[in-house]
Image (tube, rainbow, N blue to C red):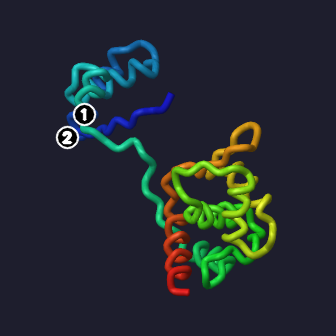
Amino acid sequence: MSRTTIPFGTQDVSTFAKALRTQLLSRDAVPGHVELLNMLARASGRRNFQDLRANAPPTADEPPIEAADPRVVERVRRCFGVEGRLTRWPAKRSDQILALWGLWSRVPAREEFSEQQISQVLRGLHDFGDHALLRREMSEAGLMFRSSDCRVYRRVERIPPPTAAALIGVVQPRRAQA
């Protein structure tokens, strides 16, 4: 189960500390997790933790947006030729995954392909002659759906991470300029 972030703050830290201290001194033992949450909520002026949760301002439960790493983008971009074809397979696994995103962006969306058809598409996107490697790696990376009998392939629609989106941006325009 995913955890919901609940922002916590108080207008006056001194009043908060005094209220929390009073609650803690009235106890004989260390409070449990839920009891402590309720004490914190009461010290901040709420009835209990459920009241705090119900009246919390809305937040995005998504991780902070990471910035694209320009050094990594440039390193992987050098694996692509001027026309946007992958000219060599990167040595680092993280660079390989990033290169797969560059290829993923050029596979037609919302289309089903047979093994022969997707192999033909991938042959047109690289120059090192191993479309089977690319087909397998894209499936294992979750960028392409492959049926259990390997008869149907389809690009998985996903939002690229920031570094992958930056790579797609520099690979695509180079292809258009050629």
15 horizontally vs 25: left or right: left
Q: Are marks 1 and 2 in contact (CB under 8 Å)?
A: yes
Pick whichever, 99 or 60, lies toward us. 99
Residue that label 1 marks? 16
User: Where is residue 85 drawn, in percent x and y?
Assistant: 66, 76
User: Where is residue 81 drawn, in percent x and y?
Assistant: 65, 82
Q: Few, some or many C-alpha atoms within 10 Å of disc 1 (few <14, some 14-19, many ≥20)?
A: some
Report whether residue 115 is seen. yes
Element marked by disc 1: helix
44 horizontally vs 156: left or right: left
Residue that label 2 marks? 12
- Residue at the (69%, 77%) spot, across then down: 79
User: Residues under labels 1 and 2: Cα distance?
Assistant: 6 Å
Element marked by disc 2: loop
- Residue at the (76%, 70%) spot, across then down: 89
Question: Hey, what amino acid is under mark 2?
Answer: Asp
- Residue at the (79%, 58%) spot, across then down: 132
User: Where is residue 101 drawn, in percent x and y?
Assistant: 60, 62
Q: Residue reaching furthest bottom?
A: 178
Image quadrant in which you'd find residue 24: top left
- Residue at the (75%, 76%) spot, across then down: 127
Image quarter (top left, top right, bottom left or bottom right) of the C terminus = bottom right
**From the viewer's perspective, is residue 62 above or below residue 95?**
above
Question: Hey, what amino acid is under mark 1?
Answer: Phe
